[in-house]
Image (cartoon, grey):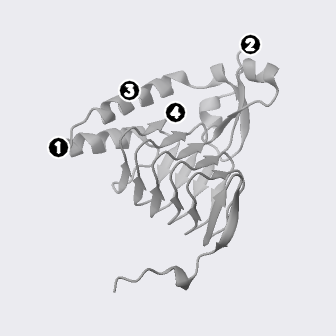
C-alpha cells in the first residue's frame, strides 16, 4: 500500500527517515539519469553546456565544482556544493538525503557517499524498505580513493580520510582517519607541511 507521506519533501530535510522503494520520486531520478548520460557524452570543448547541465542537476551548484568522468548520483537535487570541489573519476553519491560538500573538498576516484541503506531484516529488505540520512563534508575535507561514507556522517573541517576507509561515525575536524571502520589515527599538525625547497 503506497504511503501518503510526501517523500520528495522528507528527503530534502536533515532528518533520517525510513521509506519503501516505491515511495521515492522516480520521475526525479529519471531526470538525473538523463542529465548524467548527456554529461558523460559531452566533448572537452562543450564547457558551457556542461555548466548548464550541472546547474540543472545539482541542488546547489558552484562553478568550481568539477565532477569527473563516470560521476553517478540518484537524484542530484540533494547534492549541495559550497565552493571548490574536485571530484575524481567514478564517484557515486546516493543522495536520498542531502549531501553538503564544503569548499575545498577533494574526493578521490571510486569514493561512494551513500545516504541510503537497506533494512537489516531480510523480510523488510525484500519488501524494498530502506533508510536514509544526510552526509556533510565540512570545508577542506579530502577523501581518499575507494572510501565509503554512509548516511548520518559528518566529516569535520580539514580532515583527511584514508583510501579504502568505511566511515560509519562522525570524524572530528583536523585529523587523519582511516580503516574499516574508520577511526582517527592522529591530528594534522604543522609537521605535515610539505616543503617545496
Mark 2 vs 4, N-terminal side: 2
**138 w.r.t. 107: above or below:** below
> Which residue lies at the image location 50% right of the left edge and 60% below the top edge?
102
> How far separated are the C-alphas under marks 4 and 3?
11 Å
Per the image, the residue denoted by label 3 is: 34
For the residues labelled 2 and 1, say whether their Cβ atoms are less than 8 Å apart. no
Q: Earlier in the sequence, mark 1 or mark 4?
A: 1
Query: Would you name the residue on which mark 4 appears?
Result: 74
Locate residue 196, reporting x and y percent. 35, 82
Task: Give the structural element (helix, strand or loop) at label 3.
Answer: helix
* Sequence-earlier tag: 4 or 3: 3
Instruction: Give the Cα separation between the discs numbered 3 and 1.
Output: 20 Å
Toward the top, the furthest residue is 1
Mark 3 against mark 1, which lies toward the viewer? 1
What is the secondary structure assignment of the residue under circle 1?
A: loop
Quarter of the image where one finds residue 133: top right
Amino acid at each position: 500500500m503506497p504511503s501518503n507521506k510526501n517523500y520528495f519533501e522528507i528527503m530534502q530535510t536533515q532528518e533520517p527517515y525510513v521509506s519503501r522503494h516505491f515511495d521515492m520520486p522516480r520521475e526525479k531520478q529519471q531526470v538525473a539519469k538523463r542529465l548524467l548520460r548527456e554529461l558523460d557524452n559531452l566533448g572537452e570543448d562543450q564547457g558551457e553546456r556542461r555548466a548548464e547541465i550541472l546547474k540543472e542537476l545539482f541542488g546547489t551548484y558552484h562553478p568550481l565544482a568539477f565532477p569527473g568522468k563516470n560521476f553517478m548520483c540518484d537524484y542530484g537535487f540533494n547534492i549541495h556544493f559550497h565552493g571548490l570541489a574536485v571530484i575524481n573519476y567514478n564517484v557515486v553519491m546516493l543522495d536520498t538525503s542531502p549531501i553538503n560538500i564544503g569548499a575545498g573538498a577533494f574526493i578521490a576516484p571510486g569514493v561512494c557517499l551513500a545516504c541510503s541503506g537497506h533494512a537489516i531484516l531480510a523480510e523488510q529488505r525484500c519488501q524494498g524498505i530502506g533508510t536514509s540520512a544526510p552526509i556533510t563534508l565540512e570545508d577542506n575535507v579530502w577523501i581518499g580513493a575507494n572510501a565509503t561514507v554512509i548516511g548520518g556522517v559528518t566529516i569535520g573541517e580539514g580532515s583527511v580520510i584514508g583510501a579504502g576507509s568505511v566511515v560509519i561515525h562522525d570524524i572530528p575536524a583536523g585529523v587523519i582517519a582511516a580503516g574499516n571502520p574508520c577511526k582517527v589515527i592522529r591530528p594534522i599538525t604543522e609537521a605535515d607541511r610539505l616543503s617545496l625547497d
